[in-house]
Image: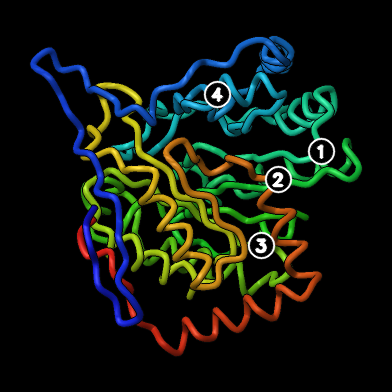
Amino acid sequence: MIERTTSRRTRKIPAPVSAEVPSNGTVRFPSWLKRGIPSGGRKSVVESRLDRWKLHTVCKEARCPNRCECYASGRATFLIMGETCTRNCAFCGINSDAPAQLDRSEPEHLSRAVKELGLRYVVITSVTRDDLPDGGATHFAAVVHALKRQVPGIRVEVLVPDFRGNMDSVRTVIESGIDVFNHNIETVHRLYPSIRPAAQYRRSLDVLAYAAKLKPDVPVKSGIMVGLGETGTGVIDAMHDLLNAGCTILTIGQYLQPSDNQVPVTEFIAPGVFDRYAARAREMGFAAVVAGPFVRSSYRAEELYRKVKNCAENSQSADLKERRRAHGSANNVSSFESI
């Protein structure tokens, strides 16, 4: 255990485990990252609908470790605007190249697939399309409109790129009728040049802040990966920045290298550290937090949405506002110097 002292109290934080790479180049995973692969359930149904309507999922394209679990439960995170990204982030398993033209039938096809799968909550994300004048915002809106029309009562969460800071594009998406606006900062400020060279930390925060101000009743969400070489203090700093930008939902998960083409894992973060991050985030005033080794942006998405909405409708709302006010006035970064 590593002991860190704060102005409030001393915290004991489990140490992370460095990524162990033997001579054959194969990374050895710690025990908490070893689990069985779910099968059966509705996996074949999900795959058949994806094939039928020629749809993509970030679960498959980004090599998500939760894909089998989600497919088996009848869920998937849909990836729109193709399977090729115009950027080449060091952590991402999605192909980077010149993308194809937009499929104008995609909004209709996706909404039909969602209806056939009986989904009541859906997460829509996309590749980054810097080749398009609006970054694909109009296409996002078309997908949301088709879903709302074809599946009455559907809740739609979008996970969007930064649109190169084009706030008109952000407005287009926000005003399309979405229920949750998600944009991931992915990592801490210090690592942006090496991990997200085509993105800007401040620009991502500005996108989130604009969304939060434009539609205060739409929850704003973001996510952070750990295990890329960040420090604990860096993660807490990022959490402060997200809270100040108006985020109410936070996800934190372990970075896992999709293939040899991406940056390797620097360290495996112990479950106890994730627990500390989550506890600190709740203390700061985030309405809903999920943190753990296998957590990804869309992990337990509907549950987090329900939690935020329930919180807004009962007495917890006043408590959260008080915690956020306290966070803003104190503005002191906590412990976690170098976990």
The residue that mark 1 highlights is 120
The residue that mark 2 highlights is 302
SS for callout 4: helix
Q: Is residue 170 visible?
A: no
The residue that mark 3 highlights is 219
Quadrant of the rendered structure where residue 264 is? top left
Amino acid type of the residue that numbered disc 3 sits on in the rendered structure? Pro
The residue that mark 4 highlights is 67
Q: Assess whether mark 2 and mark 1 are in contact (beta carbons under 8 angstroms).
A: yes
Please state which of residues 222 and 38 is positioned toward the viewer in this rendering: 38
Q: Residues within 10 Å of mark 4 (few under 14, many from 20)?
A: many
Q: Residue at x 60, y 59 (%)?
A: 288
Amino acid type of the residue that numbered disc 4 sits on in the rendered structure? Arg
- Mark 3–mark 1 Cα distance, whole angstroms, equals 18 Å
Q: Which of disc 2 and disc 4 is earlier in sequence?
A: 4
Q: Which of disc 2 and disc 1 is earlier in sequence?
A: 1
- Mark 1–mark 2 Cα distance, whole angstroms, equals 9 Å
In-image side of 251 versus 268 (left or right): right
In-image side of 24 versus 320 (left or right): left
In-image side of 37 versus 216 (left or right): left
Q: Which of disc 2 and disc 3 is earlier in sequence?
A: 3
Q: Residue at x 38, y 31 (%)?
A: 32
Q: Which of disc 1 and disc 4 is earlier in sequence?
A: 4
Q: Position of residue 262 (x, y in %)?
A: 27, 30
- Mark 3–mark 2 Cα distance, whole angstroms, equals 12 Å
Amino acid type of the residue that numbered disc 2 sits on in the rendered structure? Glu
